[in-house]
């Protein structure tokens, strides 16, 4: 029996609002619209682990979901919400008012057992496909595995997390800075309904620790702070926009500073590794940015490097923040908090372990920027296996420029 969804099955949309994406999609799109509106880019879907059944079987349903996605527009209510965020500019809101994802820029095909999804076209357009595509693939995949038992297990684990946080709170240990965590789980969630339940539960049960979500739709719905600044694609884009390669990080950070002038001050550090990042993150940027985000490599070693860097620059670390967001669960977050909380502010963005902890193995899927303006882009992350680039020549050049050994 084929698992392919038959057209007779009732259509249940995965994405119901264009706000149902990560905040950083909007915060990256705005400076790109202002600084490089002509960029052409390609984003490619990759599954990094072996799924429970071939993703190629979901092709027809993925197509139907993308057709629906391309019919959505921002409502006036949604635009009003975005416009009220003080860092969003009125011309950007006007751009979103006329925005609609175009089906012509995205292709879905089956390659053997794999699903091949490519979004290619104007970057200020196709970059918005990423989170929606990941949410669609995840939800369709797990619809087949979703049983009442899986939901019961998810709720049991959710209650364990609440109990762990309450126990931590009851210990009443006085640290220099509070423990705060956020939901970063749109892209790999079990389902939209489950993410909603998880976010609502944390907001209700442990508001002293749970401080927001990257999902703008849920932030609006539950009166939470939408969280996010930049992703790898933002910095990588500058590898292909006419600046010298060795200056791409400085150009990206400078463009950000000019766009936001003090808002959204957390910089991502691992596009070419922490050491190369700190080489560019001089006193000027260290004072202008509120903090740094960790997304690969050993988090303790990374945090110690950040603290040493601030100390060298004579910047008071208590005024800065380290945000950890690499495959965390709550126990790992609390452990890192214990290590750093008396020396610097911390924050913890937790994804899969909040929104897809059901006792079923999650998919490890990404949809990454692979080229911009006809040139390859890459990240040389601090974790082997997170590098995504087919162009060995460009990777070798990038390593050479930033003196990174393969």
Image: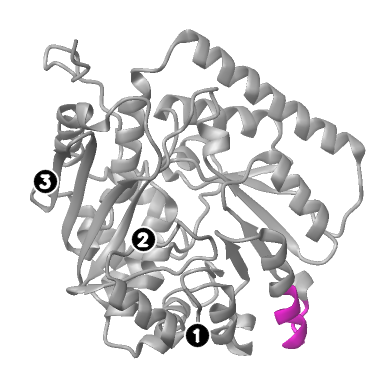
Q: Are marks 3 and 2 in contact (CB under 8 Å)?
A: no
Q: Main secondary structure of the magenta part?
A: helix
Find residue 382 and report its horizontal and vertical position in percent. Answer: 54, 65
- From the viewer's perspective, is 192 left or right of 94? right
- How far is the residue under mark 3 from the one under mark 2? 25 Å
Residue pushed farthest left? 104
State the residue position of label 1: 403
First-in-chain label (2 vs 1): 2
The numbered dot on residue 388 is 2
The numbered dot on residue 266 is none
First-in-chain label (3 vs 1): 3
**Color encoding of the figure:** one colour
State the residue position of label 3: 103
In-front residue for pair 262/314: 314
Which span of residues is magenta-colored? Answer: 307-316
Q: Residue at x 54, y 40 (%)?
A: 223
Mark in front: 3 vs 2: 2
In-front residue for pair 331/82: 331
């Amino acid at each position: 029996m084929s698992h392919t969804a038959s057209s007779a099955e009732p259509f249940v949309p995965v994405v119901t609002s264009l706000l149902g994406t990560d905040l950083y999609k909007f915060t990256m799109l705005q400076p790109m619209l202002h600084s490089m509106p002509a960029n052409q880019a390609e984003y490619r879907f990759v599954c990094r682990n072996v799924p429970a059944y071939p993703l190629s079987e979901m092709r027809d349903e993925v197509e139907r979901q993308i057709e629906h996605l391309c019919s959505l527009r921002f409502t006036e209510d949604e635009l009003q919400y975005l416009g009220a965020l003080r860092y969003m500019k009125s011309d950007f809101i006007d751009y979103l008012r006329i925005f609609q994802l175009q089906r012509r820029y995205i292709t879905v095909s089956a390659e053997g057992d794999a699903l091949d999804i490519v979004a290619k076209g104007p970057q200020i357009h196709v970059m918005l496909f990423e989170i929606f595509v990941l949410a669609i693939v995840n939800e369709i995949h797990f619809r087949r595995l979703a049983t009442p038992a899986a939901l019961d297990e998810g709720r049991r684990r959710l209650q364990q997390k609440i109990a762990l946080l309450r126990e931590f709170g009851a210990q009443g240990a006085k640290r220099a800075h509070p423990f705060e965590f956020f939901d970063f789980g749109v892209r790999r969630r079990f389902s939209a309904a489950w993410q909603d339940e998880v976010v609502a539960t944390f907001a209700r049960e442990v508001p002293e620790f749970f401080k927001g979500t990257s999902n703008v739709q849920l932030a609006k719905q539950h009166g939470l702070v939408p969280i996010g600044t930049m992703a790898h694609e933002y910095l990588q884009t500058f590898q292909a926009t006419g600046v010298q390669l060795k200056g791409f990080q400085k150009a990206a950070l400078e463009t950000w500073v000019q766009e936001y002038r003090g808002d959204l001050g957390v910089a991502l550090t691992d596009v070419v590794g922490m050491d190369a990042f700190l080489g560019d993150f001089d006193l000027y940027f260290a004072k202008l940015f509120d903090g740094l985000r960790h997304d690969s490599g050993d988090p303790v070693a990374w945090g110690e490097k950040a603290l040493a860097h601030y100390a060298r620059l004579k910047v008071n670390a208590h005024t800065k923040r380290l945000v950890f967001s690499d495959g965390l669960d709550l126990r790992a977050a609390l452990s890192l908090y214990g290590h750093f909380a008396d020396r610097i502010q911390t924050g913890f963005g937790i994804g899969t372990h909040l929104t897809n902890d059901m006792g079923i193995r999650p998919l490890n899927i990404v949809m990454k920027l692979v080229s911009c303006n006809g040139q390859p882009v890459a990240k040389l992350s601090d974790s082997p296996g997170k590098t995504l680039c087919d162009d060995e020549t460009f990777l070798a050049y990038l390593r050479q420029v930033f003196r990174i050994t393969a």
